[in-house]
Every structure is written in C-alpha cells, then in structure tokens.
Amino acid sequence: MSEYQFGGFFGALGEAISTDYPDFAGASSLGWDGRQVARETMATSYAVAAVSEAIAASDDEWQLADLASIGVKLPSPLPNLVSGGGRVSAGNGIDWKEVFPSQKARALVRAVAALERGDNLERVDSLLWLPVEDNDPRTAFRVAVAVSDKLKRLGIDVPPASIAPRVFTDGDPVCDPSWGLPVLEKKRIDVFSRSFKGSGEFFLRFSGEEGRRSRRLLNLPWGSAPALYDVSYTTPYREVLSSRLTKWGSVQRTLDDELGFESFPVRYTLGSHPGRVCHVKTRDKHVSVSSPVSVETHLLSKLSAFPFRRLFLSHPDQVWYETKEPPSLYVQNALRGGGFL
C-alpha cells in the first residue's frame, strides 16, 4: 500500500510561483496567488487518485463512469503518478498489489474536502492515515509500519505484516515482551491494540494529550489541532469528486496559458507507476530513493519531488539510488523551464 504525500511538493510549487511571478495574483484572470494554484492542483490530484483507487477496488457504488470521462489534464508527471491503480509490475516476475484501495479512495476524497475547506497543504497530508471506518485495516497497517520503523531504529527487525493483526483487534498487545521496550513506551504503543467503534471514539482516544504522546512516539502526525471532521466517515464522496473535477475542467486551460504548465490528459488505468513502490527520504537537503524495481535515471528528480511513502510488504532485494537535488529546488527549476520534466 502506498500513500500519497504531496503537501511538501505543492507547498514548494506555491512558493515558486509566488517567487517567479510576484504579480501573478493580480495579473491572473482567476485571481489566484501561487498558494491557491498549488491548493487547487493538489486537490485535483487527490481527486484523480481517488477515482483511480475506487476503480481498482471495483467500487461501483460511487457510479464512476461519468466522473472518469471528465476531461482532466494535470502538469507532467502527475497524470502517470495519480491515475493508475491496482498492480505495479516489477519486471522480474514480481507484481506489487495495491491493498485497501477502497479505504484509500475514501481517505483521499476526505483530503479533497479538507483542501476545499481551506486546510493547510501539509496538514492535509497528515490526515491520510486516519481511519475511514471502524478498525480500518489500512490505518492498522500504517500503525504497524510505524511500530516496525521504531523497532528498526533499535536494531530489532519485525515486519509490519506480523504486527498488523494485533492493531485494533482487542487481542494480543501490539508490543511483544521480547522487544524489551521501556514500560511507558510499551503502554503508549499498546493503546493501538484496542478496537474502536465510531470515529468519535477514535478521536477521543488519539486527539488528546495521551493520544498525542502515543502518536508522537510512532511519528504518526495529525496536524497541530485535530478536529472531529478529520475522521469523518460520512464525506459525500461522489459529490466532492464531481465538484472538484468539474471545477478543474473549467480552469485548467487558463492555468496552462498563464503559467506555461506542460499538461497531459489523465487516463484512468489499472496498473500503477513504478514510483509507487519507491521509498523517498530527505536528510540534510539530500534525497535518497530506494526501490525494489529498476528505476530509470530521468525518474529520480520526479520521485524526489513526488515522495510516495512505501508501505508495501517489502521484497528483501532493495535497489538504491540517490539524487542530491532537494524537491523545492527541482520545482523551481522546472517551473522556470516552462513546465515539469
């Protein structure tokens, strides 16, 4: 399962537009400044991704046929990154299967609604792991990945797949005594063992001070001020998607003309971009990309700008690549060059 993490990229996009086109808000026929352009593009990207994931899940209740036929164009390489769902072929006989596509689609639509509401771009990214249903298996797996990552930092190797069955199940505690964690840390992690009924119960458990300490221990973000609507199960999915894609269809040509975006049509397909199985980390302004599949050199800058978080059940053979260009610089250079590479 991969997660979309676009807040940092689109934040950099907004800053780049504001820097390179300081009078854009006044000159734009839309009246948008760089930050608003970034917000609108990010919301549309998430909407496209949601439709793709729902198609992969064969979620017919959304009645997606007419939505998938709306003419949408996005700056390159966004169409490839967000318009595919289902499987990623490694080219070596291994297929990487998207898991929990239905839950992921609903989380993405809720993120679109948050952007429409005016939430901070980076804050919206912090909401994607939150549940869309009771004891959401996607959220449980995300917690398991966080626990596994913490253990790796302690030199203990426990795969997420062996931790996930203990999350939100009222069964065995998440923490195994053999891990030797301090009592207080064990107590805070084991809070994730208990199931929850309704989004309100999840909110009360993890939005307060004790819940915040548990989340902080596992680097599970939730913005600076958690709100009950962040975990709403009742987002009107179809209405949100229809409104967002229709709105974008009415402004995309203007943005292309005024900013020189090199945009390409979205084609919803089963089968995802190789970037979906790559893990991108930034440290000291350097970006490293690890991948279980062969990645062409020209994709490295794109992957550093669009850092998908790898939450797949990992294959042991990892291929490492490195690019020293930070995402914000890549965005600025691409924009000044008249489009995204």
Image (tube, rainbow, N blue to C red):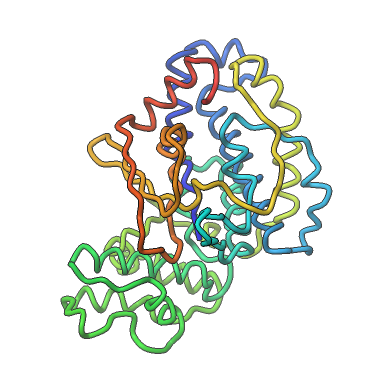
User: Considering only vertical position in the picture, is 155 above or below 125?
Assistant: below
Question: Depth check: 268 or 5 in front?
Answer: 268
Furthest toward the front, the residue is 92
Residue 308 coordinates in the image, percent (x, y): 46, 48
Question: Depth check: 213 or 57 in front?
Answer: 57
Residue at 52 percent of width and 72 percent of height: 137
Residue at 63 percent of width and 54 percent of height: 85
User: Considering only vertical position in the picture, is 324 above or below 219?
Assistant: above
Question: Depth check: 227 or 115 in front?
Answer: 115
User: Considering only vertical position in the picture, is 151 above or below 86?
Assistant: below
Q: Is 215 positioned to the left or the right of 116 in the image?
A: left
The quarter of the displayed image where residue 82 is located: top right
Residue 178 coordinates in the image, percent (x, y): 20, 84
The quarter of the displayed image where residue 57 is located: bottom right
Residue at 46 percent of width and 19 percent of height: 18
The quarter of the displayed image where residue 115 is located: top right
Residue 141 coordinates in the image, percent (x, y): 45, 69
User: Considering only vertical position in the picture, is 296 above or below 223?
Assistant: above
Residue at 34 percent of width and 80 percent of height: 174
Residue 109 coordinates in the image, percent (x, y): 63, 52
Q: Is 320 positioned to the left or the right of 243 in the image?
A: left
Question: Depth check: 91 or 50 in front?
Answer: 91
